[in-house]
Image (tube, rainbow, N blue to C red):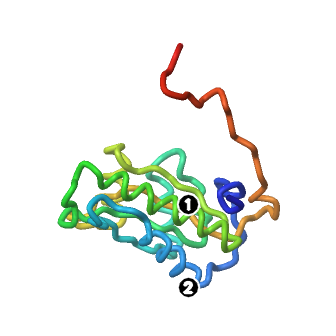
Amino acid sequence: MDVIDRRRSVRAYQSREVEPGKIEELLRAAMQAPSAGNQRPWEFLVVRDRDALERLSAMSPYAKHIAKAPVALVLLGRKGRMRFPGNWEQDMGAAAENILLEATEQGLGAVWTGVCPVPERMDAVREQLSLPDELTPFAVIAVGYPEKEDASHFVDRFDPGRIHYETIEE
C-alpha cells in the first residue's frame, strides 16, 4: 500500500532528464496491466522534444504542465488490437495507473492528463503528433523529477461513508 499511499499528481518538475532505463521501467509497468481478453490494445509514444511537448500542452487548458515536463508518455489504443472494443478504455486506464505507481516507486513525479473521450483533445493530440487513424489517443502522462521534495506525501482519503454492504440506502 505504501506506493499507493504516496502517489500524487505532480505538475512541477526539475529540469533534470529522466533516464531511459526509468522510462523503460514505466512502460514495462504499463504493459503488465490487466486487459480484457488479453487484447493489450496499447501503444506508447515517448515524447522528449521540447517543441512537441509545447504543442501537446496546448491540447487542453489543463495540460499546460506538459510543456515543462522532461518527458511525456502518450497512451494510444490501436484499433486493430481491440478484440473487445467496449473495454479498451478500461485496459488503458489500468496501464496508466501502473505508470503512475511505478513513477512514484522510482522517485519520479507524474500526472495523468485525460484526452479520451473528449473529441477536441483527441483531435488535437492526433494532429499535433501526426498520428495515423489506427491509433486513438487516450491520455498523456507528464513525467519528471518533482520540483518539491515532499511531492509524494501521504494524504488519507479513506471515507467509510462511501462504503455500503448488501444495499444502498439514501
Q: Which picture quadrant has residue 20?
A: bottom right
Residue pictured at 36% horizontal, 43% vertical: 118
Q: Quarter of the image holding residue 25? A: bottom right
Q: Estimate how packed mark 2 is, as few (under 14), some (14 to 19) or many (20 or more) residues with alpha carbons within 10 Å.
A: few
Say whether marks 1 and 2 touch (CB < 8 Å).
no
Residue at horizontal 47 percent and vertical 75 percent from the top: 27
Name the residue tied to disc 2: 20
Q: Nearer the viewer, residue 53 or 97?
A: 97
Q: What residue is shown with label 1? A: 66
Residue 124 pos. (x, y %): 35, 54
Q: Amino acid at mark 2?
A: Pro
User: Where's residue 18, x and y in %?
Assistant: 62, 79
In the image, taking residue 145 as reference, residue 84 lies left or right, namely left
Between residues 167 and 157, which one lies in front from this camera angle?
167
Given the image, on which type of amino acid does mark 1 rest? Answer: Ile
Relative horizontal placement of residue 61, taking residue 124 as reference (left or right):
right
